[in-house]
Image (tube, rainbow, N blue to C red):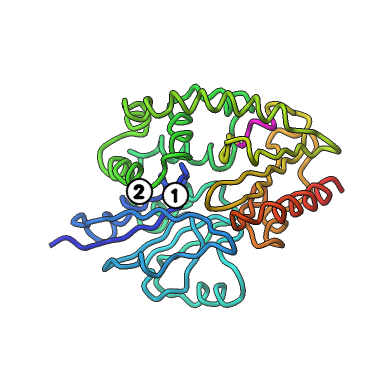
Amino acid sequence: MSKPVVIGYHGHCFDGMASAAVLSRLLRHVEANDLSITYRGLDHQPGGSHVPEAILIGELNAVVDFRYTTSDKLGWWFDHHVSGVVGELERAHLAADTSGHKFWGPSYGSCCKLIADIARQRFGCDLAEVAELVHWADIIDAARFPNATMAVELKDPALQLMTVIEVYGDDPFLAPRITQLAHDKSLSEVASEAKVQKLFAPLFEQHQRTCDAIKARASLEDGVVSFDLIGSGDDRYNKFIPYWLYPESRYCVALTASKTRSKVSVGSNPWARVPRSHNIAELCARYGGGGHEVVGAISLQADQIERARAIAREIVVTLQS
């Protein structure tokens, strides 16, 4: 009889998808090949991001690319966000863990790369078959593109899949593709499949309209490009557009809103001539958000638009100093 496993992963996220697929391969290597894996996407929520206890219903439970939980039901955990472990209680709980199955690597650009390195170094797991997936997860999540043009033009199938995931990255769409990547399909095969390309076509048209909307709404002052997309119909955007439009910028602060939340996104230009001097994760944490040193966000309730705008203004001033 197969062992029931639940893997919680960061939903709507290329790195979350890749991390879940790579962990699946590691678990089959360590635990057994006869595993029945269910994938559950996790999203950041207003007021803090937590792993719902209700999803941890497997005989074995794992979470990747998402905040730590002190639940005694958690068997495996990997994350690379600076804000992945919050507060002394969580830090002490993680430090006291003796399972050898929980890993925090805030110096990593992607969670997938962290899992791949630990799998090879600690468990002797050969992941050569998913080298392409690990490579692209690290490029996308760590913004290791050679230039903004590549990130905005979206010519590579991996970037087209990334774009589709950001909109359709819930479990019905993503879980079957994680299963494919965890078994016999390559990233190129999944990214190039007809359904992905059919979904990508209108999204690319919208992406081009969003480029125009950001160009019309954005302004650059003292190295910080900022814009407000609330009311524009866009609640997601390619985070590299601002740096493509304003290559001289150092930082970006953006406002978006959906039916479920209002959001302040904060980033630093990977190609800036002047080095970054602010820790974005720490800055966002002041307002209940989090992320990485180079990129982060704050999620608020959907009706807290004016509060989001006030936070954005404060962050812009901070980044300009």
What whole-number distance in Å separates the C-alpha atoms at marks 1 and 2?
8 Å
In the rendered image, the residue lying farthest to the left is 1
Question: Mark 1 = which residue?
Answer: 11
Left or right: residue 264 compared with residue 172: right
User: In what quadrant of the picture does the N terminus appear?
Assistant: bottom left
Left or right: residue 286 compared with residue 10: right
Q: Residue at x 54, y 57 (%)?
A: 105
**Type of amino acid at the residue the image marks with label 1:** Gly
Q: Is residue 248 magenta?
A: no
Using the image, determine if residue 93 lies above or below residue 202: below
Q: Position of residue 162 (x, y in %)?
A: 47, 35
Occupied quadrant, residue 74: bottom left
Question: Mark 2 = which residue?
Answer: 171
**183 vs 202, nearest the viewer:** 202
Q: Is residue 241 magenta?
A: yes
Within 10 angstroms of label 1, few (less than 14), some, or many (20 or more) residues? many
**208 vs 111, nearest the viewer:** 208
The reply to whether callout 1 and callout 2 are in contact (CB within 8 Å) is yes
Give the main secondary structure of the magenta stretch. Answer: helix
Give the residues drawn in magenta, as a range.
239-243
**Type of amino acid at the residue the image marks with label 2:** Asp
